[in-house]
Amino acid sequence: MNKDSNSTKVFITCALPYANGPNHLGHMRSTYIPADIYARYNRMKGKDVLFVCATDEHGTPIAVQAEKEGIQPIEVASRNYELIKKDLESCDISFNNFSRTSDPLHYEISQNFFLKLYEKNCIYPKTIEQLYCPQCERFLPDRYVEGTCPQCNAEGARGDHCETCGRHLEPVQLIEPSCLLCNSQPEIRKSDQYYFRLSHFQEQLKEVMENNHELPSNVRNYALQWINEGLKDWILTRDMDWGIPVPLDDTEGKIIYVWGEAFLGYISSAVQWARRNNKKWKPYWDDQTVHFIGKDIIYHHSIFWQAFLLAYGCKLPYNIVAGEYLSLEGRKMSTSKNWVIWVADFVEKFEPDLLRYYLVANAPLTRDTDFSWDDFQRRVNDELADVVGNFMHRTFTFTHRFFNGKIPQPGPLNEYDQEVEKQIKETPERVGQHIENFDFREGLKEIVRLAKIGNKYFNDQEPWKTVKSDPKQAGTCLYLCNQLAKVISIIITPYLPNKAAQMREILQLNQIDVDDTGIVPILKWDESEVFMEVGTPIAKAKPLFKKIEDKTIAKEKDALYKNLEENESMEDLISIEDFAKINLKVGKIIGAEKVKGSDKLLKLMVDVKDKKLQIVAGLATKYSPEEITNQKVIVLVNLKPAKLFGIKSEGMVLAAEDSLCLLTAPDADIGEGIR
């Protein structure tokens, strides 16, 4: 068990879903389902659980979307808040409170937190260089800028983060940045901002990460990598309207950076719950706090958030549990390419418990995994239907057929019976240990293993035969099988709350009635230790898990791949307006050399009359530098510069894609346009 297993209160949070769109299956797998399992289990163990979340509603993506739609950012956030809330409810995520960072209470708490750190000299003013767009007439916050990453040379890096190498960036670090709204090149201007003294907490954070042995390795190792490189002070304000205003004099037009206030959504959601229920929230935080997050925000929670808490003087979280990525059919999920399964679409066709089962059973939370429709079908059919459901159905059916629907009197237990009884009694403890250690998959495997034991025992005992030849043996078999079914109906509850309730309905056990808060279950984990008495009536068997047919899966796969094909085909099409932007000219190759380290690339110098362009082209397998020099070629001259092998390329030499043959213009003049 974990070191705080005697805690009476547990504060559980989920990473705040960003309110720029609904949830997909990756969100559920990494964060919300594991957190809900942990919350439900702790409630069943008698813990006083406060489980909260909120939508994260500030930041530039929402502001950019609102500008594109011609509406206010709060309208975008409100629309998506409702979608996200519906997604989470449809998967039975049992929050005590789900709020919003646009709530006035959150503004109040965030501004007070900022002021407290400012008064403690953990936040200080600094004049810095920032990107300013003359065309838009404003400073550009990080997400309003894209460019080339200075660390790995990847294009499309954002002003705050490079998705390719994972580096945290500042907008002015980008190579050849452009304004996301007007595509013009911004200029550097002086700006007054406020910084958080992150570097001051370097050694404290290192000690925290090394000494908190509850932290999973993926969190600890990732955080220490950054800490060991040396932490730099962190800009905490932005020049924009959408966000929480900086609560200082002479700061009009400045807001607290979204990562400077979104964390506090955990606190503001808890305070909202406490005020509504006339309770205090802080004892929950001080007893045991667990954050459930996705892999992509380990850096923010392990470093920024914990540094904030150290600065303020708060107790640090007991654990930070980070779920790794979920891919789809072997490919990285992409919402832009519609290569994604949205929660709302899934629960329209399949029961949410099937999703909860598959996303937990598929792989450990600390390892990347893949959603495969075929594997989903296999696990539901082979494990839930054929193992768990089959065991339950046989047990209940034979109890009705041979023992009038009542728990039979067992005979003397032989060695085999005693071993089965031992597994029935010991499994809840093993499952509980796995959940408390955040090994949710291992806990679920123990439950399925117990059902497999039950199936084997049932087959070996052959009660359909012994009911006539040895009724006491048959009675013993059905007695133990019903006890095993009862145990599963309880310990599977955190994982599959709806299916567990159906199991208990057949067993005519108490359902998950709730107390006056509407959340805490009366059903307790320890009830799994108590065997049902002889003569206890049970209801007739009902199908618990239906097998998924091949045609159902084929339909889902066809729809998914059709989305991808349509998206890719549309990407290949351009409008007449796009074509009009293309500027093709005749150029003469006046110099050529091979690119060191590449068998395919040539570095060309091309004269297009009014200027000379350096172009990197993949022509080395077809042409030598000598062969290509002095050739007149067609050049795309207004292509956005890019870096290939670290060499700047300022255009494109046109060639036939299938043969790499140059498209030449031997009789045309240099610089002549092509139409």
Image (cartoon, rainbow, N blue to C red):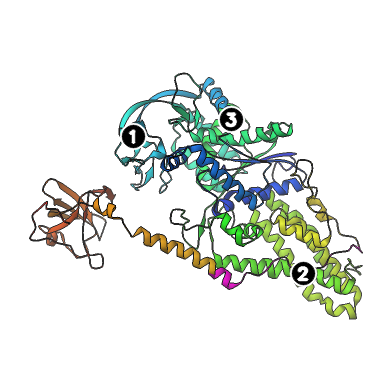
Q: Amino acid at mark 1?
A: Cys
Label 2 and label 3: CA atoms lie apart by 52 Å
- The magenta stretch is 534-554
Mark 1 near mark 2, Cβ–Cβ under 8 Å? no
Q: Residue at x 26, y 54 (%)?
A: 579
Residue beneath disc 1: 136
Where is residue 148 drawn, in percent x and y?
Answer: 33, 44
Disc 3, SS: helix
The amino acid sitting under disc 3 is Pro
Residue sticking out furthest to the top: 249
Tell me the residue that label 3 is attached to. 104
Name the one closer to the observer, 156 or 418: 156
Q: Earlier in the sequence, mark 1 or mark 2?
A: 1
Tell me residue 485's x, y (percent): 79, 63
> Where residue 285 is drawn, which disc sits there?
none
Residue position marked by numbered label 2 in the rendering: 393
The quadrant in which residue 491 appears is bottom right
Residue 474, located in which quarter of the rendered image? bottom right
Q: Main secondary structure of the magenta part?
A: loop
Dividing the picture into quadrants, the one containing residue 661 is bottom left
Crowd class of label 3 (few under 14; some 14 to 19; many from 20; radius 10 Å): few
